[in-house]
Amino acid sequence: MPADSYEEVRFSSIDKGIEIDAWSIPSRKNIDSATVVVVHGINTSRKDFTAPLPAVMLSHSGLNVLLMDLRDSGGSTCEDGRHSAGQNDANDVLAAVYWLRGKHDIPPAGIGIHGVSGGAIAALVVADRSDAVAAFSLEAPIFDFDEAAKQEVRYQGFPEFLWQAAYWAARLRGVDLRAIETREGISQLNGRPLQVFHGTQDSRVKFENSVDLEAFARQSGVEVTLYSIESADHTEGILLEPDLYYRALGSFFSASLLN
């Protein structure tokens, strides 16, 4: 991507005192104003490979992209250095959506989200809170919060019972990590399409999360497509199957936002 092909932008989150850094990347084909907000995962930023790779793919597919840093990440405001399981991050993503509407006059029907891991959680919290986004693409999402929290604690090398301590510590500082869970976001899609990518050998967020998510989505009447990336660990799928991602991301958002 040429150095002059993106613009550094900054806007305020919904929460007072939080400023968000982002890159605004115009479509390489300039065929429409539809835009996809790309949201990175936990302990990464918009510079992690899992964010700019899909962003460039989307740009080459004819879509504009807003590649953002969530709070406590990259160039955005460091609030407290703690993750909120998407609850607070969703306000940053919604702020990006409102910025697109106010700055570029893009309607809700022209805005999509691609969320990676922790960014996928935030995306589904947005789906529950707002109808201002037309389509959702997720990479390695969680489904069962309790089990995913235990998996994350084990992944970090600690006994799984410690997740309960983390949960109540968050409650004491005013954040309910389970205020809006994945299934609630799916239940509120109300006809908005969903696609999911997940590596079958994911050691951090087990592949079964997406299998269960797909089943629940279908039971809820949601239009959903699950791409199972064989032998891929956590968020590695885009490295192993780049052509699949390029085709799937471009076709999904083109069909969802450009028509």
Image: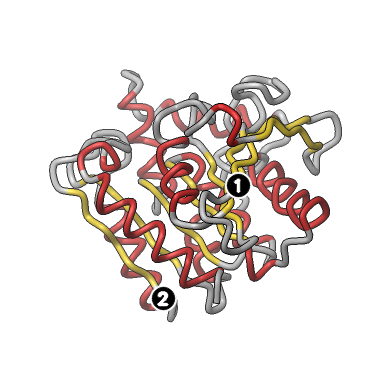
Image coordinates of residue 17 in percent, x first then y, are: 84, 29
Mark 1 surroundings within 10 Å by alpha-carbon count, few (fewer than 14), some (14 through 19), many (20 or more) = many
Q: Secondary structure at mark 1?
A: loop
Residue 129 versus residue 61: which sits nearer the camera? 61
Which three-letter amino acid code belongs to the residue tagged 1? Pro
In which quadrant will I find the C terminus? bottom right
Which three-letter amino acid code belongs to the residue tagged 2? Glu
Residue 258: give its label: none
Q: CA distance from mark 2 to mark 1?
A: 28 Å
Residue 162 versus residue 63: which sits nearer the camera? 63
Q: How is the image coloured?
A: secondary structure
In this rendering, position of residue 256 left or right of residue 81: left
In this rendering, position of residue 219 left or right of residue 84: left
Image coordinates of residue 108 in percent, x first then y, are: 69, 67
Identify which residue is drawn at 59% across, 54% down: 125
Q: Secondary structure at mark 2?
A: loop
Residue 158 versus residue 42: which sits nearer the camera? 42
* C-beta proximity under 8 Å, tags 2 and 1: no
Identify which residue is drawn at 67% across, 34% down: 7
Identify which residue is drawn at 66% across, 22% down: 75
Identify which residue is drawn at 54% across, 42% down: 39
Vertical arrangement, residue 216 with respect to residue 176, above or below: below
Q: Earlier in the sequence, mark 2 or mark 1?
A: 1
User: Which residue is label 1 attached to?
Assistant: 26
Q: Which residue, as the protein is rendered here, is positioned at the far right?
A: 16
User: Which residue is label 2 attached to?
Assistant: 223
Mark 2 surroundings within 10 Å by alpha-carbon count, few (fewer than 14), some (14 through 19), many (20 or more) = some
